[in-house]
Structures are given as C-alpha cells and as structure tokens.
Amino acid sequence: MKRTIIKIDEDLCNGCGNCVPNCHEGALQIIDGKARLISDLFCDGLGACIGHCPEGAIAMEEREAEPYDEIKVMELMVPKGRNTILAHLEHLRDHNETELLKQAINYIKENNIDMSPKNGETLHNHTHHHSRPQAFGNLSEARAAVAPAASGCGGGCPGSKPIDFNIDLKKVQDAVAEAKADTTVVSGGDAPSELRQWPVQLHLLNPQAGYFKNADVVLAADCVAFSMGNFHNKYLRGKTLAIACPKLDSNKESYVEKLTTMIRESNINTLNVVMMEVPCCGGLLQMAQMARQKAGKNIPVKKSVIGVQGNVLSEEWV
C-alpha cells in the first residue's frame, strides 16, 4: 500500500544517533555509521524522529510500504522493558492514535506483560520539547489516556499532526437550536464549527488515523466551503473531512491510494463526494470510484453537486 513513511538522506546523516531513542517503535538503528529504517512495519509515519535530527536528514515521503503493524511493534518493545513500553504508549497518545493505543494496551493485558517497576528502576521522563509534559507512570495512566490528547504536536510538521477534536455533537446541536430560537441573534454571527479533526487536506491525511475508523467521510472539493454558506451544517456535522482539488493538486495517484486505504483498512461507512458544478470537479468523483473498485468493497458513494453560488444542484448515490 502507498502511505506516509520516513526517508533518510544518507548524504546529510552524520550517524549521531539522536533519532534512534526518539523512535519509540524501534524502526531506526545506526548501521555502518548511518541511520537506517530497519522495517516499514515498525514506522508509523508520524515523524516523531524528525525534530531530533540536527542535520535535517529525515523527511516524510509517500511510497509503497508495508502497513504499520502495532502488534509486531509491541513484540519488539516488550523485551526492551517497562520504560520503553510506556514511552511508546505515550507516543501513541501524543499523536491521538487511540485505536493503536488500545491495541497496545490489549496486547499487554492478553500476554500478561509485567508492567511493575523492577528493583532500582525509576520512571524515565520520555517527554521532549514537542510532546505533552506528562509521561505515563504506569499502565493505569496509559489506559486513562486512551482519550485522545488535546494539544501538542508530537513531532514532524506541527501543521499536519493528526488531531481528533472530539466535538460534543449534542452541545453543538443545542447551540444551533438556541441560536435559531433567539430572535435577537443577527445573521452573520459566529456559527459553531462542525470540524472534527485536523489536518483536512488529503495529501496530509493519514488514511488509517483513528478518526477514519468506521466513519462517514466527506470528500469535498477545495472551493465548496467557500461557495456554500452552510457547508458545515449541511454536510460536515458528524462526519470526517478530506479536501482536494482534482484540477490543481499534484500526485493524484496518491489520492486514489489513500481513499482505497480508507475504504479497505479503515472500513469507512460512506463516502460523500461534494463537488462544484464546474467540469474539472468531476475528477474527484472518478478518484472515489477508482478507490472503491481497487478496495474491492462496494461502500455507498454519494455525489453532491454545488453551484457556484452555493446552491445544491443535485444529490444522488452512485
């Protein structure tokens, strides 16, 4: 599958090894004086190692790679001891990878891994300048942290760090109802956002992020939200969002791969392609249909066409 994974520039790498302890999955080793990615299976593609390279030798790229495997990572982590395991769990928490964190905790429980401190062992503070200031002290704290983190960039590009906003839909709906009932509210006032996650641009999204699991997904053309005044209320409420421009964006093949992964691996429920009436937007629907075919799963796909003045021209399941 095509996914985001690290790339090491060997010409820039000086073999300092700063990246190795900051890859809690154990995907990096110093071999022949250079940092090496020892297995695609162990790289989660979140980029926590990037900020620790003084030479700028580590970057992210999209390429064909084996899917990240949390169970294999845990098998690698366990022999390294309690502190290493806790550092890995903290890493998952800081990146809001709730499903992976649950898998890791379940692995510990099912395999009766002893997480009690050994004689003379103290809790190592795994936090660094990119992560939240509190490390796990024990497995109970790790379980409690299955609720995703609210802040911190956790490494890599801060703008592309996955964030699940955990919107309280009932509060939003109550606020909308209250605003409608209040005749003193003037039109043009601030409306509550329905956005549930970050990032939203399809190139930046991890198609296996927790907020895609069994989700109803909106794939919207970039122009839609600017043309349509009530886009959040009509299309975004309770949904996970991805945006793209089928005309101007590059490497659209990666879009098809990411959509395929969402359908096949993240088991999304539905996909609503919200596109403008202009001809170039048709490519967005084509990508969705190609992904559905490649995934081999006939999930419901809806085509919603928006006029250039923001009116809904048509909606149909395709």
Image (cartoon, rainbow, N blue to C red):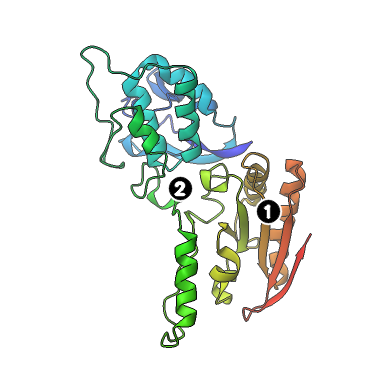
Q: Nearer the viewer, residue 103 or 301?
A: 103
* Distance of label 2 from label 1 (alpha carbons): 21 Å
Alpha-carbon neighbours of circle 2 within 10 Å: few (<14), some, or many (≥20)? many
Do we see residue 38 in this rendering? Answer: no
Between disc 2 and disc 1, whose residue precedes?
2
Which mark's residue is nearer the viewer, 2 or 1?
A: 1
Do we see residue 113 in this rendering? Answer: yes
Rendered location of residue 180, percent (x, y) = 49, 80
- The quadrant the C terminus occupies is bottom right
For label 1, the SS is strand
Per the image, the residue denoted by label 2 is 162
Per the image, the residue denoted by label 1 is 270
Q: Are marks 2 and 1 in contact (CB under 8 Å)?
A: no
Question: Is 236 placed above or below 294 here?
Answer: below
Compared across the picture, whether 236 is left or right of 296 comes to left
| Amino acid type, mark 1 | Thr
Question: Is 27 placed above or below 176 here?
Answer: above
Q: Nearer the viewer, residue 198 or 53?
A: 198
* Point 64% across, 47% down: residue: 268
| Amino acid type, mark 2 | Pro
Which quadrant of the structure image shows residue 30? top left
- Count of numbered labels shown in the rendering: 2
* Point 75% across, 49% down: residue: 290
Rendered location of residue 171, percent (x, y) = 44, 64
Rendered location of residue 149, percent (x, y) = 37, 45
